[in-house]
Image (cartoon, rainbow, N blue to C red):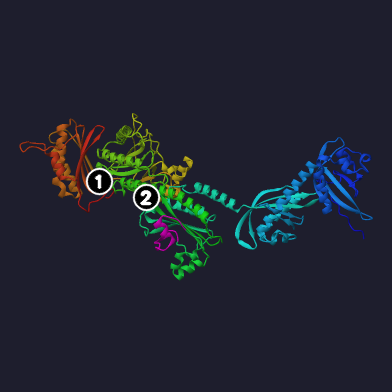
Amino acid sequence: MDTPVTTFSESPDDPFAVRRSASAVLDDTGRVVGWSERAEALLGYSPEEVLGRAARDLLLDPRDEDVVMAAVAAGVSAGGWFGVIPVRDRDGARVEVGCRARAVVRPGSRVEWFLVSAPAEQVIQWETDRSVLDGMFRRSPIGLAVLAPDLSLLRVNRAIARFGGLPAEHYRGMRTGDFVVDRDTALVESGLRRVLATGEPLIFTEQPCHLRHDPHTERFVSVSAFRMQDASGSILGVTELVEDVTDRYRARRRLALLNEAGARIGTTLDVEATARELAEVAVPDLADCASVDLLEPVTRGEEPDHEPSAAVRRTAVRSVSPETPPVMFPVGHTLHFPPEAPQARCLAERRPVLEPVLEFSPAWSTLDPAKAERVREPGVHSLIVVPLVARGLVLGVVSLWRWRRPEPFEEDDLTLAEEFAARAAVSIDNARRYTQQQHAAVALQRSLLPREVPEHHAVETARLYRPADTTSGVGGDWFDVLPLSGLRVALVVGDVVGRGIHAAATMGRLRTAVHTLAHLDLPPDEVLSHLDDLVDRLAAEQEASDENSPQIVGATCLYAVYDPVHGRCALARAGHPPPAVVTPDGRVDFPDLPAGPPLGLGGLPFEATEWDLPEGSLLILYTDGLLAAWRRDLDEGLALFRAALSDPARSLDDTCKAVEDALLPESPRDDIALLAARTRRLAEHQVATWELPAEPTAAAEARKLAAAQLHDWGLEEMALTTELIVSELITNAYRYSSGPATLRLIRDHHLICEVSDTSSTSPHLRHAATTDEGGRGLFLIAQLTTRWGTRYVRNGKTIWAEQPVESGATGVGSA
């Protein structure tokens, strides 16, 4: 059987390749006995000119004799020589050539010298390349491995040997999986096979690397690889360069974590949310578990206590596993750290605490055995505690734990944790201060709103008020139910433009003004006109006093007055959404009222509209945040609103709840106020009205009519007082008015006496002297009634007075 012959193509870079090098043969006397064509090309001598001649005479320049003879002596002594020597070409020029000499023994013990030569620059370059290759294997700090096509190792350099923990000569024939764990080996070999298959190099690919002799230490390596081929294109294997970049990877990862912390921590002005963001950034890239404990006042937005032993509240916990370790307290738990605990030392000294190995920590020895076992059970072995300090205030601590990652915390981890804590502390303090201001604003807002909707006999009322979420700030929405004379009632809803304490304070001023204007019994359009003037004045005052403070932009308002005697409602609005009206049969309408300009524009008139409301109708007043809460299309919002109001028979509280469920998100971005009123009508027998001529006998006639009506109502005990009141009011009307007067008695929980005339002169109290014959009428009325007043109508005025009716009297709508 023939033995196979393996052939290798010569490297095109080898200066001594047969097809490139010049060759010559010298006998034992130094005469040239062989000369190649390449030698002729290199030095210019033809074979006829050199064969048989002494090389020393032909090729040696006398100036170089010492150098050349020293090389000859070295070659004779060693049986061969390699180096660069100077020779003389055919033109007499001195030429340096690389020469490789080897002694060859001929029959008869004759020695001949076989010489192979090439231009010196080619030899020097080749030697430099060989030196680089030798350096890569012997001195390079970057790992170098040469692998066969089957990915078995052919050779590794000393860096790989140190990395793998074995001498370099032991690696031949081994595979990567013999010293690298399986999951990392699969990643490496898949990349090398791809290089072998495609010829595309692998460049600086980073991946984890766990060695079998130290599997718990995580390293990161940068892998580059290229395919090896001979001159004919046959694949010889793959060369792999491996660099340990663990420190660089961790530094880059820390920088990435800092950037991530800057982007993720402090996205809201919420203390608890910011604490959760801190814990989420730290886990799992830095720690296996993180807990954030804040001093209790901080969670309420208050200034923190300075006592190290102060109570803290667990505000956030984050773990790599679904269940936190049993040593962890849950979120919301209030605790006191014992003095020996790392957290207590951290709070007291305002310095971070690093416990690389918890079992060797001084605090470990102070733990009771049960708690120590709870810590030991999940394998918790390393701890970092960092204080949360901002603007000189200690807000709390963040604790970082490791139990799944075997590496203990080190100084670099502590530095990163301090960066996290510093960023989070500023955000938490900002959130705390915002919470403090928000609480103050909410307290102001609540103090300016009615705590309860007052009961009124003309309407049944209910309200819905939802403040905006904490990030939006308090608003200026308000509502009111104001009793008026004649058993009428005013229903008011308004909204100040803007947000914050400024808007809440403006709302309080407007609400106070509405109360005052309602007490004057002005019609709705006049009330809005006076409010418009007030907003103008407030804006002008503020602009003149402080140009940097938020300016009053304006407000909207809807003012309605309902009269249960006639069942009529008068409304006017200033840039406010129209009300919803639900009739007893369930029809829902949004009356097309004159819009009117928002308050604060000035100079534009307001227009009031009146219409009849059947008893049991619903009048729904609301602010614009109701329909805009979900940012829906307006038509869609109105459709949902109609559906929520479509059942007039249910209670008003249930109606408000239905509107809330249908239209409001969990955290609206704007305040929402809604006032619902169900109308009542006064029974005909509860009202008595007479028109009296302007005659001297009008007062006597009025007393007689009032006495008879009180007898019919069973209120004879109130007759004497009522006759006196009626007499005084009619007498004033006769004295100061030129036309007839109208007397009206209304019986409810109060007995209301009203006298209307055509005069617009306002009555006022006087303190009459003892000698005066008159001037005591209104003074007597003020003494005999609970309240009295004047309201103006289009054709005159009405003076009214109220007296309480004893219990047992019938109410509105009763027979």
The mark that comes first in sequence, 1 or 2, is 2
Vertical arrangement, residue 735 with respect to residue 190, above or below: above
- Which mark lies nearer to you, 1 or 2? 2
Residue 674: x and y, percent? 38, 45
Q: Badge 1 is on which residue? A: 685
User: Callout 2: few (<14), some (14-19), or many (20+) C-alpha neighbours within 10 Å?
Assistant: many
Spatial separation of the CA atoms under disc 1 and disc 2: 28 Å
Residue 651 appears in the picture as rendered: no
Residue 550 in sight in this render: yes
User: Could you say where residue 593 lies in the image, as x and y percent from the top left?
Assistant: 38, 35
Query: Which amino acid is tagged 1?
Result: His
Q: Is residue 644 left or right of residue 683?
A: right
In this rendered view, identify the residue nearer to me: 597 or 145: 145
Please tell me whether mark 2 sits on a helix, a strand or a loop.
helix
* Circle 1 SS class: helix
- The residue under the point 70% across, 51% down is 136
Q: Position of residue 732 (x, y in %)?
A: 15, 35
Name the residue at the bottom extreme: 369
352 drawn magenta: yes
Q: Give the amino acid at mark 2.
A: Leu
Tell which residue pokes out farthest to the top in this image.
603
Residue 249 in the image, given as x and y percentages of width and height: 59, 51
Residue at image coords 21%, 53%: 807
Q: Is residue 811 left or right of residue 376?
A: left
Q: Nearer the viewer, residue 751 or 741?
A: 751
Image quadrant where residue 53 sits: top right
Say if 345 sits above or below 122 in the image: below
What is the magenta range? Answer: 330-353
**Res 168 label:** none
**Whether label 1 touches label 2, CB < 8 Å:** no
